[in-house]
């Protein structure tokens, strides 16, 4: 594997490790995250888990953010409050693998909620501009 390709960044600053973390979050089930082969291979080849994207988020932060979004989406669809259960051991293990060497970045800790364009509807309040929509 080309060492330069391990830490290549796209137009948004995402590395292959970040993309793999986002994909892993999307594959979460009741049994946790079972398929971490790509992440394990990238880390084995020395992919840099300390790199951040243009929003200041690491692969760890992106994984955590996507897991939180998934949890919120599922609880909304099921009409239940978000789960307060601890993470599945496989999720905890993956978070540990992706944790930057100096700990989460400020953006990781905020979960991306202060990024431009992010709208947090978790408090149940929706903004309205008094327009009605007919579908």
Image: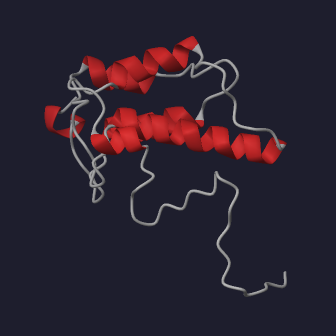
Q: Position of residue 71 (x, y in %)?
A: 65, 38
x 40%, y 65%: residue = 116
Q: Position of residue 118 (x, y in %)?
A: 48, 61
Q: Is residue 5 left or right of residue 70?
A: left
| Image quadrant occupied by the N terminus | top left
As drawn, the residue found furthest toward the left would be 4
Q: Out of 89 and 33, give the one closest to the viewer.
A: 89
x 44%, y 20%: residue = 94
| Image quadrant occupied by the C terminus | bottom right
Q: In the rendered view, tell whether residue 115 sits above or below residue 81.
A: below
Q: Out of 67 and 15, give the one closest to the viewer.
A: 67
Q: In the rendered view, tell whether residue 101 sits above or below residue 15.
A: above
Which quadrant holds residue 52? top left
Identify the coloring.
secondary structure
Q: How many marks?
A: 0
x 22%, y 32%: residue = 50
As drawn, the residue found furthest toward the top would be 89
As drawn, the residue found furthest toward the bottom would be 131
């Amino acid at each position: 594997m080309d060492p330069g390709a391990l830490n290549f960044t796209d137009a948004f600053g995402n590395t292959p490790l970040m993309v793999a973390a986002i994909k892993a979050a999307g594959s979460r089930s009741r049994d946790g995250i079972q398929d971490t082969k790509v992440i394990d291979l990238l880390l084995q080849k020395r992919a840099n888990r300390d790199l951040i994207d243009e929003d200041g988020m690491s692969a760890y932060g992106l994984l955590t953010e996507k897991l939180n979004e998934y949890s919120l989406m599922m609880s909304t669809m099921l009409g239940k409050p978000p789960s307060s259960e601890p993470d599945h051991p496989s999720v905890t293990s993956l978070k540990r693998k992706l944790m930057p060497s100096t700990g989460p970045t400020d953006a990781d800790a905020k979960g991306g909620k202060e990024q431009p364009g992010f709208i947090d509807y978790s408090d149940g309040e929706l903004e309205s501009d008094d327009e009605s929509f007919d579908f």
